Structures are given as structure tokens and as C-alpha cells.
Image (cartoon, helix red, strand yellow):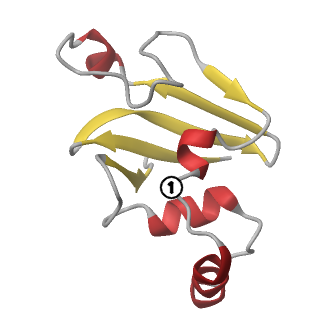
Amino acid sequence: MRKLKIYRNQILAGVLTEESRNSFMFQYDEAYFNNSTMSAISLTLPKTQMDYRSEYLFPFFFNMLSEGVNRKLQSTQLKIDEEDNFGLLMETAQYDTIGAITVKPFSEK
């Protein structure tokens, strides 16, 4: 199981979990959810206390990934399977992304 903290404008919005290659979950952080000034991270992931579940990486997060030659180059340089969407997201969406969303490795401290 792998997890990522999802940030919107440097504010923790929630946690994305890969339970297996065919099972993903996203849940909003409680403080983020309870703050009425914070909007949903995506129209496809409205703010709710329920867990979002999917058999594939949610399209909102998948669309943060490179395609084609750039994806192949990233997977080669980072030594990550080109089909490992979650792994690529973990390594490429931490700093310089288009838009307000970034990810950080999850630690249970």
C-alpha cells in the first residue's frame, strides 16, 4: 500500500491511497473538509466525508502525469515502470505542477 498527501495551494487537502494496482482511495483531510473557505480539489471529487474509491487512478490525478515521450523519459530516468501511474505521480508531482495541486510522500509520524 502506498499513500500520498494531497496539497492544494500548500494546504493539506487529503490523502490518496493505492491499496493495490486496481484499488485507489481518496479522502479529504478532516480540517480541510471542515473549513468552508476551502473548495474541492476537483469538480469530480466534491468535498465530502466519504471515501472516494476507484479501480484505477482517479482521472483528476492521472491527468497530472506526462504522456508520450516525456512519460517514457521520466520513467527511464526515475527507474519506474512506465505503467506505474501512482509511482510516477509520487515522483513527478511534488514540486512543479500545473495548477494548485501538489503531492508529498506520506509518513505516519
The picture quadrant where one finds residue 26 is top right
Describe residue 66's horizontal placement relative to residue 103 as left or right: right
Judging depth in this view, the residue of 71 and 75 nearest the camera is: 71
Q: Residue at x 23, y 21 (%)?
A: 38
Q: Quadrant of the C terminus?
A: top left
84 shown above or below 76: above
Neighbour tally class for label 1: few under 14, some 14-19, many 20 plus, Cα within 10 Å:
some
Q: Residue at x 54, y 38 (%)?
A: 16
Describe residue 75's horizontal placement relative to residue 46 as left or right: right
In this rendering, the count of numbered labels is 1
Describe residue 99's horizontal placement relative to residue 21 as left or right: left
* Position of residue 8 measured from the top left corner of the image (x, y, whole percent): 29, 39
Q: Residue at x 62, y 41 (%)?
A: 59
Identify residue for label 1.
Answer: 64
87 shown above or below 2: below
* Position of residue 55 measured from the top left corner of the image (x, y, whole percent): 80, 35
The picture quadrant where one finds residue 32 is top left
* Position of residue 84 measured from the top left corner of the image (x, y, whole percent): 72, 64
The residue sitting at the left extreme is 37
